[in-house]
Image (tube, grey):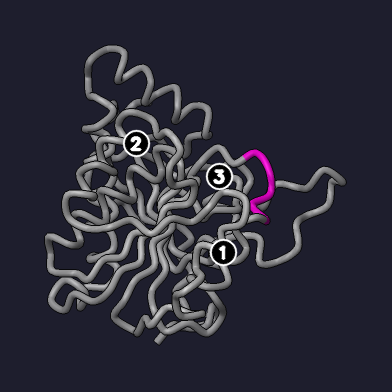
C-alpha cells in the first residue's frame, strides 16, 4: 500500500543510481548546457541520452521496489510534448520488455515532438497504442475510461509530462494529478527529473500571474523522483516529503565534472 508521508524514510541525501557521480547540484540551465555541449562535441547523441535516461529510470524503480523486478504489474506512463515525454516512451518500452502491462498516455498528442522524442514515440507505436490527452482540456481525454485507474500495490504511474524548466503553473494538468497521484493511492508514483508542476530550481510550484501559488492539486505527487547526472536545487527542498518524494540520481554518461 501507499505509505503516508510521515512513514516514509526521509532521504536527506539523494541516492545515486550507480553510475559515475556528477556534481553535488546542477541548475536547470547548467544541466541543459551540459547536455547540449556533449551532443555538440559528439560525445553522445540525443537519442542515446534518451535511451540511457529511460534505462536509468527503470533501474531506479526496480532498485527502489525490488519485488517489482520479479512480479511485473501494470504501468501507466504519462508522456508530454518534449524530451521528458521521450524518456517516458523509453520507460514504457523497457517495462513492456520485462513483461509489464503498459498503457501510454500522451498529453499534446498529434503535435510535433523533438526529433529524439519522436523516434522514441515511433518505437513505442511498434509495440502498443497511445491514448491521447488534449492540451487544452486533458481531462476530456479520459472520457470512456474508468474515473480512476485500476492500479494496485504492485503497479506504477510514471510522470513524464514536463520535466525541468517549468515556467508557469501546471493547473491545466490538475485532472491528471487527481487521477494518477491522488492521496491514499495503492500504487507507486514516479516522476522523471522532477514532478510536473514543480520548478526544479526552487522545489516549488511557479506562481501565477498574480504572484500567488496555484491552487492544489498543482503538481504530480511522486513517491520517487529519478533525475539525471546530478540533483537539481529543488530536489533538496523537500528531503523526502511531497511532492518530490525520495530522489535517485541516474548517470547518463555525461562528463563527471559538469
The magenta stretch spans residue 144? no
Q: CA distance from mark 1 to mark 2?
A: 41 Å
**Which residue is identified by label 1?**
140
**Which residue is identified by label 2?**
22
Q: Is residue 26 above or below residue 44?
A: below
Other residues around mark 3 within 10 Å, as few (<14) / some (14–19) / many (≥20): many
* Badge 1 or badge 2: first in the primary sequence: 2
Which residue is at the front of the view, 27 or 119?
A: 119
Give the secondary structure at mark 3: loop
Label 1 with label 2: CB-CB less than 8 Å: no
Q: Is residue 231 above or below residue 118?
A: below
Seen in the image, is 209 located left or right of residue 250? right
Which residue is at the front of the view, 7 or 199?
A: 199
Rendered residue at 32%/28% (across/down): 115
* Badge 1 or badge 3: first in the primary sequence: 1
Q: Which residues are magenta?
A: 167-171
**Which residue is identified by label 3?**
200
Residue 210: x percent and y percent?
A: 87, 46
Give the secondary structure at mark 2: loop
Amino acid at each position: 500500500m501507499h505509505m503516508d508521508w510521515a512513514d516514509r524514510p526521509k532521504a536527506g541525501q539523494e541516492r545515486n543510481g550507480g553510475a559515475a557521480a556528477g556534481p553535488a547540484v546542477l541548475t536547470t540551465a547548467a544541466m541543459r548546457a551540459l547536455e547540449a555541449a556533449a551532443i555538440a562535441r559528439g560525445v553522445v547523441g540525443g537519442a542515446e541520452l534518451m535511451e540511457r535516461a529511460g534505462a536509468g529510470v527503470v533501474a531506479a524503480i526496480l532498485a527502489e521496489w525490488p519485488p517489482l523486478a520479479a512480479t511485473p504489474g501494470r504501468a501507466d506512463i504519462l508522456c508530454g510534448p518534449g524530451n521528458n515525454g521521450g524518456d517516458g516512451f523509453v520507460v514504457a518500452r523497457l517495462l513492456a520488455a520485462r513483461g509489464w502491462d503498459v498503457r501510454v498516455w500522451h498529453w499534446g498528442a498529434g503535435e510535433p515532438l523533438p526529433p529524439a522524442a519522436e523516434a522514441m514515440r515511433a518505437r513505442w507505436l511498434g509495440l502498443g497504442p497511445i491514448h491521447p490527452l488534449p492540451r487544452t482540456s486533458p481531462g476530456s481525454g479520459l472520457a470512456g475510461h474508468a474515473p480512476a485507474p485500476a492500479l494496485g500495490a504492485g503497479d506504477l504511474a510514471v510522470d513524464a509530462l514536463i520535466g525541468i524548466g517549468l515556467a508557469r503553473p501546471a493547473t491545466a494538468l490538475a485532472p491528471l494529478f487527481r487521477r494518477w497521484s491522488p492521496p491514499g493511492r495503492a500504487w507507486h508514483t514516479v516522476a522523471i527529473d522532477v514532478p510536473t508542476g514543480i520548478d526544479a530550481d526552487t522545489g516549488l510550484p511557479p506562481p501565477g500571474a498574480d504572484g500567488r501559488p496555484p491552487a492544489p492539486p498543482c503538481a504530480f505527487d511522486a513517491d520517487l523522483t529519478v533525475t539525471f547526472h546530478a540533483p537539481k536545487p529543488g530536489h533538496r527542498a523537500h528531503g523526502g516529503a511531497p511532492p518530490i518524494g525520495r530522489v535517485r540520481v541516474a548517470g547518463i554518461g555525461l562528463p563527471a565534472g559538469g
